[in-house]
Amino acid sequence: MLIIKDASGEIIGAQVEEPTDSDIVTYIAPTDPQHTLHRISDVPAEICDCAHPAEFQRLLTDHANSEHAQIAPTSTEEIRRLFMGR
């Protein structure tokens, strides 16, 4: 899952990364220089499947702040390189 954090470290955007057979790839990207893009590689299905926005935000934030989260900074350039290599 990709997430965007604001300058204070709060999650302000998220996108579940799903495999696609399409040549068109879309992903979230920060628009403010103070915002950062991260990848969480171990998000439980319960969070990904949550359809209620406030509950999703709470679950994702709790997970991202837990000691179990595998979170790493990334960039739009890195994501673009990953998909261009297909």
Image: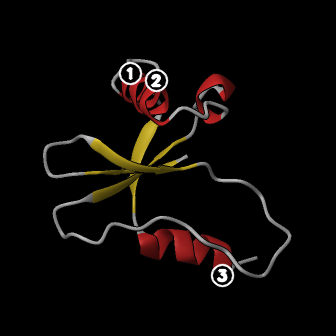
Q: Earlier in the sequence, mark 1 or mark 3?
A: 1
Q: Amino acid at mark 1?
A: Asp
**Disc on res. 30:** none
Q: Is residue 23 above or below residue 51?
A: below
Q: Is 30 situated left or right of 55 in this image?
A: left
Q: Amino acid at mark 3?
A: Met
Q: Residues within 10 Å of mark 3 (few under 14, many from 20)?
A: few
Q: Residue at x 44, y 76 (%)?
A: 77
Question: Which residue is the extreme one toward the top?
Answer: 67
Please tell me whether mark 1 sits on a helix, a strand or a loop.
Answer: helix
**Disc on res. 84:** 3
Q: Residue at x 45, y 30 (%)?
A: 60
Report the residue marked by disc 1: 62
Report the residue marked by disc 2: 59
Q: Is residue 39 above or below residue 66?
A: below
Q: Amino acid at mark 2?
A: Leu
Q: In the rendered view of the protein, which quadrant contains the C terminus?
A: bottom right
Instruction: Tell me whether the residue at label 1 lies in contact with that at label 2, contact meaning CB atoms closer than 8 angstroms.
Output: yes
Please state the horizontal and vertical placement of residue 18, each as a whole percent of the image.
Answer: 72, 54
Please tell me whether mark 2 sits on a helix, a strand or a loop.
Answer: helix
Please state the horizontal and vertical placement of residue 42, each as a whole percent of the image.
Answer: 58, 31
Question: Which residue is the extreme one toward the right?
Answer: 21
Instruction: Tell me whether the residue at label 2 lies in contact with that at label 3, contact meaning CB atoms closer than 8 angstroms.
Output: no
Q: Is residue 35 above or below residue 80?
A: above
Q: Is residue 36 above or below residue 27?
A: above
Q: Earlier in the sequence, mark 2 or mark 3?
A: 2
Tell me the distance, in whole angstroms, between the alpha carbons under discs 2 and 3: 32 Å
Q: Residue at x 48, y 70 (%)?
A: 78
Render colour scheme: secondary structure
